[in-house]
Image (cartoon, grey):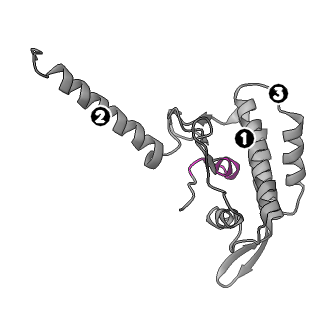
Amino acid sequence: MGFIFVSGNLALDFMGTLKWRRTEPEELLATPADLGRWAVEAGVTSEEPAVDGADLRRLRSLREAVYRLVTEAMDDRPWPDDDLRVVNEEAAGAPPRMRLTTAGLVRSGDAGAVASIVARSAAELLSELGELRIRECALKECTRIFIDRSRGGNRQWCGMEECGNRVKVANYRSRKHQATTSTGPGHPG
């Protein structure tokens, strides 16, 4: 299973590792190894960092703090102090180390470095909220939040491959069903 990076911000993509929050939550960070894979797929580290159960709980706690801060800001409500503290503490940690080699850039670090870079991304995002168009996916069940950078500012779905296609297929089926029932037996048309 691969992770999805469609939100336009590392912290928002990290929030998306818990899908369908309001209906049937799907945890994409079920094991410490999942967190290590996410770090590599997100480009945070070049190799999977060593992650244990405590690290996983720590990063999930950060994820939920960021989610609450973002959603509170979207609703023009004040930020919870505890969540702000979590983000600030994690952001103060050392980010991944970078080393330039003849093969390219190598990023390395532990779970704390992953937490630091996610928290820094969240802090930068939250400090710029007034300048960004932040949206939640229009698919009712989806809770992914993204930055709308579309020219017209009318992006509706987190991504076409998952949610956009679901909506389009549902709309097509609805139109087809309506056409079938309106021209069915006993109907003049």
Which residue type carries mark 2?
Answer: Arg
Question: Where is residue 159 shown, x and y percent of the image?
Answer: 49, 46
**Residue drawn at point x = 62 percent, y = 55 percent:** 28
Look at discs 3 and 2 and give the one toward the viewer: 2
Secondary structure of the residue carrying numbered label 3? loop
Q: Residues within 10 Å of mark 3 (few under 14, many from 20)?
A: few
Which residue type carries mark 3?
Answer: Pro
Q: Is residue 10 visible?
A: yes
Query: Looking at the picture, does residue 42 appear above or below residue 72?
Result: below
User: Mark 3 or mark 1: which comes first in sequence?
Assistant: 1
Secondary structure of the residue carrying numbered label 2? helix
Question: Where is residue 35 shown, x and y percent of the image?
Answer: 69, 62
Q: Which residue is mark 3?
A: 78
Is there a contact, CB below 8 Å, between mark 1 and mark 2?
Answer: no
**Residue drawn at point x = 66 percent, y = 78 percent:** 104
In screen coordinates, is 109 left or right of 34?
right
Residue 8 highlighted magenta (yes or no)? yes
Secondary structure of the residue carrying numbered label 1? helix
Q: Residues within 10 Å of mark 2 (few under 14, many from 20)?
A: few
Q: Which residue is mark 2?
A: 173
- What residue range appears in magenta? 6-15
Q: Is residue 117 visible?
A: no
Q: Which residue is mark 1?
A: 67
Is there a contact, CB below 8 Å, between mark 3 and mark 1?
Answer: no
